[in-house]
Image (cartoon, rainbow, N blue to C red):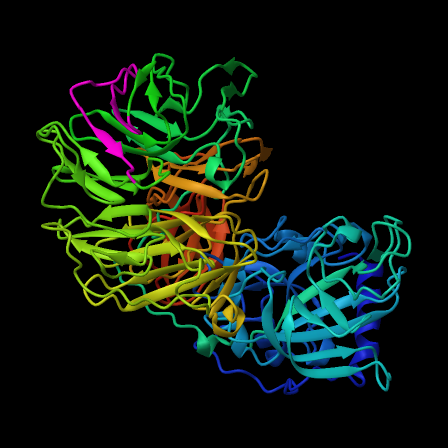
Amino acid sequence: MNASRSRRYAISCAALLAGLSLGPVAPATAEPVPTKTAVKYDGKTSETAAASCFEIKQNDPEAPSGAYWLYTPAMSAPAQFYCDQETDGGGWVMIGRGREGWTDTYDGKGDPAQLATNPDGTDAFKPVQLPSKTVDALLNGQAPSQMQDGLRLHRALNAEGTQWQEATATRAQIQHWSWALSSFANWKNISYFYGPGSASNRTYAASMDRIDQHGNTNSITFAGRKVQNWNLGFGYGGDTRLGSTDPGSYIYSASADAGYPIPFTQAFLRPRVTQADLATSQIPESGAPASARRALPNSYSQAMLWRTSRETGTGNVGEMNTNVQAITEVNGTVFTGGDFKNLVSASGEVVDQSFLAGFDVQTGQLVRGFTPKFNGQIKALAPLPNGKLAVGGEFTEVNGQPVSNLVILDPATGAVDTTWDWRLENRNTGGVVSVSTLDVQGNYLYVGGTFTHAKGNTSTVAAYSKYATRFRLDNGGVDWKWRPIFNGSVNGINASADGTQVFAAGYFSTVNNEPAFRLASLNTVDAARTGQWDWKESYDKVRSSSYNYQFDVQDVGSAVFTGGSEHLIASYDKNTFARKSSSITRNGGDFQDLSYSNGVVYGACHCGDGMYQGAETWMGAWDEASDVHQIRLLGAWDSETGAYLPEFNPQLKGFRGDGIWESFTDSTGTLWVGGDIAQSLGAYGVQNTVGFARFAPRDVTPASVPTNLQVTTENGRDRLTWTGVAEGGTTYQVLRDDRVIATVKGTSYEVDHRDGARYFVRSEDVADNYSASTPVATAAAPAPAA
C-alpha cells in the first residue's frame, strides 16, 4: 500500500468513525485477549500470526491498518491479509476488492496476496476475491449468518474516489461463505452510512434479493445486467447516475449516464476470533498426519482434443436432441452418443461420423476403427459383461440393417452382433419406440423408454412389458417373470448393487396399477413394488399436472438419489423412502442426469445460477436453504450426507440452455459430461468443448515426507535443518508445538530459541497437498554459562 493511498484511506475512515453506526454491532473494546501461551500473537510475522484482525486490534489498540499474518487451524499455514484497524474500532479483514468484473464462483478470483499488498487505488480496480475456502478458514467454523458484524462494503460515492459509503448486511441462514451473491437470498441487519448526521443514513431489518435493493445508492446489486455488459460488482440501484466510462473513474459504467453503475468496493468481514477459540492439540512425537483432501475432479476442463459439431445429425433442435446424451467405457474406449452430425479435432480436422464415437481413455484421441452408421440419435449406452456395447435410442437402422432401437455392437469396429435377436414394439395407437435408459446388473440388462412389448432370443413372441423390461445376458431372452407395467415413459432406471431393488424415474404415476408418482422401486423377482414412495414434490401443483416429472435415479449403496423437474435433487432411504437430503437450483435447473463414483454423486442439469442446499420447494428455496452456491450445469454431492461439494465448481455454457444430459467417470477417474455444451473454462481460458467436456481428477496425493530434521541452538536462535524431497516446486512448512510458524523454499530455518520447543517439518506440493511431518525434534535448553 503506497503512502499516499494509505493516508487517503486513513482520512476516509477517520471521517466515518465519528458517528459510524453499522446496525447492531457491539463496539470493539481494547481489553487484552488471553492467549494459550506467552507468545505475543501480533500478526507482524509468520511465527506470531494472530487468529484474526480483531485479535490484533484488541491486543494493540494502536495497531494501524495494513498487512498482517493470520492463522487458524483450518489453514495449512499462516498467510498475509489486509486488516482495516480504523473503521468502527477496527478488526476487519479484507476478503475482496475491485470495481467491475467480480465473480460468483467458489474459488474467488485473482491472486489473494494482492489484497494484502495492493488494497486500493486505481491499480486495484481489477477484482481480487479470496477463495471461499479461505474465507471459511478465517471464520474458524463460524457461520456467516451468525456473525455479529456481517459483510461490510466500503464503496466509492464519486468518480474521484474522495467520497465513500459504508454498507453492511448479514446473510441469514447461511452456514458457509459463498460468493454466489447474485442468487436471491435472505439478508438482515442492512445499513447504509454516509457520514455523521447524514439524512441518507438508513437501516433495514431484512430483505430478500441479490443482496439488497432499496433504490439509488441505498442499494447493493450484485447481479449482471445488460446495461453494464453483464459485469458483476457491488452496484448501485438503477436510478443512480454516478458512473463513467473513464477507466480511471472509481465508479464504472459501460455507457454514459447508464443505471446500475458499479463502484470500486472493498469487502470486509470481522471474525471475532482469538487464540482461545483455536482448537489445536499437541502433535504426537511421531509427527502430524498428511493432508486428506477429497478426491474430486478439477474444476477446469481438460484440453479440448475433439468435439462434436454444433449441428445435429437428425436436423432437429431442442433439449431432447442435444449433441451428447450417453457416455460409457468398454475395453479402454470411452463412447459418446447423442445427436451430432460430425466430429471436429482441435486442429480443425472434420470427421464424417454421426451419433456415436469412441475415444481412447488414456489419450483422449478418436478411435478411428470404430465407425458404426446410425440413422437416428442415441439416448443410452451400457457396457456388457462379455465386453460388448449395448446401444439404445431412436434409430431404426445400423450399418444399413434394420434394428429396433436397441443393438449390441463390437466395441472395436462398430459391427452389429447379430447373435442378439432383440425387438421392441410400441402397440399404443400412434406410438413410437424409444430407448431412454440402460443399466446392467448381474445377469440382466434393464431397459427403459417408450415401448409396450419386448422380444428376445428365446421366444418367437413379444412379452407385454410396458415402458421397462429386462433381458437375460446368458441366453438373450426377455425375462418373462419381470414385466412391470408403467402408465408413462421411463426416463431413468438403475438396479441396486445388492441386487434387491430396481429404481425407476419418469413421467408415470402408476406401476402395475398401483400408485407410483414419477418414482418407483421394484423388486428383482417379479417387478412388484417394494413400497410406497410417497415423496414430497418441489412444486406445489396437483399431481395430475405435468410438473414434478423425474429424469434419473441413482443407487449409491446407502441411499438412492433422484433428480428431475422443478430443480430438485434429493436422496432417500432405500427401505423406508424417507428423504435424507435435498437441494434446489434457481433460476432454471431441472436435473437431467445422475451418476455415481467414489462416494460422490454428480448431478447434471440446465441450471446456471444458485444451488440452494437443504431447500425442498422451488418457491421457497431461499427461505429453506442452509447454503447457497453457484452452479453452472454440473455439481457434486456427498453420497452419504447429500451435502453439496462446492470445491468442484466447473464453468460450462451451452448454446440454447438445454443443459447437460449425461455424466460418466472413466477408469482413469476422469469425469466426462455431455449435452448442450458450447464452452467450458479450462486452466488456460475458455475452450470450445462443443458436445462434451472432460475433467481430470485433481491431485490429492500427499507430498513426500522430508527426513532427518535436526535442531541446534546458538546465540539464542534455534536452527532447523532437514533433508528435502525431489518434487519440483515443493515448499516446506515448519511447525512448532501445535501450529505452523513458517513456509520456506529451502531446507533450513532459524527462529528465536524457546526452551523445549517441539519442531516438525512437512512438505507441500504445488497442488496444495502437504505431507505427513517428520518426527519431533526438540530444542534443548542451552548449557549454563561457566
Quadrant housing residue 723 = top left
Res. 737 visible in picture: no
Queried whether the magenta region covers residue 411, the answer comes back as yes
Q: Nearer the viewer, residue 142 or 200?
A: 200
Q: Please, is residue 112 above or below residue 19 in the view? A: above
Q: Residue at x 19, y 18 (%)?
A: 418
Outermost residue, front side = 429
Image-based side of 460 in relation to 719, left or right: left
Q: Nearer the viewer, residue 565 or 622?
A: 565
Q: Position of residue 435 (x, y in %)?
A: 32, 36
Q: Quadrant of the N terminus?
A: bottom right
Q: Please, is residue 313 above or below residue 666 in the view? A: above
Q: Quadrant of the C terminus?
A: bottom left
* The residue stretch that appears in magenta: 404-427
Image-based side of 130 in relation to 288, left or right: right
Q: Residue at x 36, y 22 (%)?
A: 358
Q: Position of residue 680 (x, y in %)?
A: 55, 38
Q: Please, is residue 244 above or below residue 650 in the view? A: below
Res. 217 visible in picture: yes
- Magenta span: chief secondary structure: loop
Quadrant housing residue 573 = bottom left
Q: Nearer the viewer, residue 309 or 281?
A: 309
Q: Position of residue 437 (x, y in %)?
A: 31, 40
